[in-house]
Image (cartoon, grey):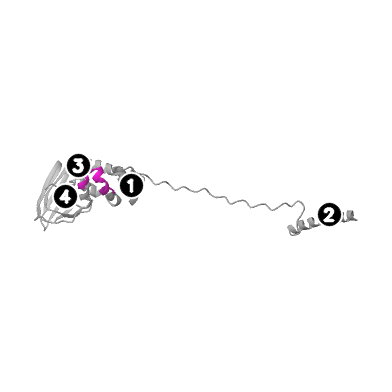
């Protein structure tokens, strides 16, 4: 009798295991079904490294480049030379303009604005001391003005003309133009337009004219640029 009961208990155990297996998959388990696949782990993109901040040498050039970087000053389209190189280039160009007879102050004022002016103000004292004072004055509007072809009204305190203008106001004084002058014509007229003095030069290298305070207008054609000499 003990032996029979032992067999019955074993059979009951097998049946229980089978019943539990069926309940584990909702009772719909089929032969050959395996365990559900484990979801794959989410792929993480590698971290993007931030570009390193530029370093600058503790030199006049390095200090200017650092200052320009901190202030966002650009001297061109962003692909040109460093601000310190720009200052050196302008310094050498002012030497050249001085040699050919152009006033460096006027030259720099005509061509400089915005960030370029800020870079020159900050960099000239250390990188180009020989032109620093004239540059700072010129960028503030204090420089010699020249006059191209056009008709200029004589005023004791004229409004400075815009670069490239062909009319405006001019102060009394002695003016000179130099270069390869061909078919140059100029005239001084009274306020009513009467011609006081005029001249036509088919060829010349230098012409000097004195404009008086009582003159009305000064007209010039094909004479290059007139600059005051006194």
Note whether residue 74 is visible. no
Query: Which residue is nearer to you in this view: 109 or 161?
Result: 109
Sort mark 4 into few (<14), some (14-19) or many (20+) by Cα contacts within 10 Å. Answer: many
The residue at the far front in this view is 2
Q: Tell me where residue 58 appears, x and y as whole percent.
A: 31, 43
Spatial distance from mark 4 to mark 3, Cα to Cα?
24 Å
Main SS of residues in magenta: helix
Pointer 1 with pointer 3, Cβ within 8 A: no
Q: Residues within 10 Å of mark 3 (few under 14, many from 20)?
A: few
Residue labelled with disc 3 = 98
Q: How crowded is mark 1: few (under 14 residues within 10 Å), some or many (20 or more)?
A: some
Q: Which label sits in the foreground, 1 or 4? A: 1
Q: What stretch is highlighted in magenta?
A: 119-134
Q: Mark 2 points at which residue?
A: 10
Dot label at residue 220? 4
Q: Nearer the viewer, mark 2 or mark 1?
A: 2
In 3D space, how far apart are the residues under numbered discs 4 and 2 (Cα atoms)? 127 Å
Residue annotated with mark 1: 66
């Amino acid at each position: 009798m003990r032996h029979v009961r032992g067999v019955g208990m074993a059979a009951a155990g097998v049946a229980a295991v089978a019943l539990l297996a069926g309940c584990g998959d909702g009772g719909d388990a089929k032969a050959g079904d395996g365990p559900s696949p484990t979801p794959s782990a989410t792929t993480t993109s590698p971290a993007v490294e931030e570009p390193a901040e530029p370093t600058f040498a503790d030199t006049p050039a390095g200090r200017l480049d650092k200052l320009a970087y901190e202030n966002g000053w650009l001297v061109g389209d962003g692909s040109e030379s460093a601000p310190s190189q720009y200052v050196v280039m302008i310094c050498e160009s002012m030497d050249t303009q001085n040699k050919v007879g152009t006033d460096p102050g006027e030259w720099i004022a005509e061509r400089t604005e915005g960030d370029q002016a800020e870079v020159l103000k900050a960099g000239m004292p250390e990188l180009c001391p020989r032109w620093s004072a004239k540059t700072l004055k010129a960028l503030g509007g204090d420089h010699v003005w020249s006059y191209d072809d056009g008709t200029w009204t004589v005023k004791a305190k004229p409004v400075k003309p815009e670069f490239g203008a062909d009319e405006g106001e001019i102060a009394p004084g002695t003016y000179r133009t130099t270069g390869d002058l061909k078919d140059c014509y100029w005239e001084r007229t009274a306020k009513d337009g009467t011609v006081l003095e005029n001249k036509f030069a088919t060829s010349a290298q230098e012409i000097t004219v004195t404009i008086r305070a009582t003159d009305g207008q000064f007209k010039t054609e094909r004479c290059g640029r007139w600059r005051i000499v006194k």
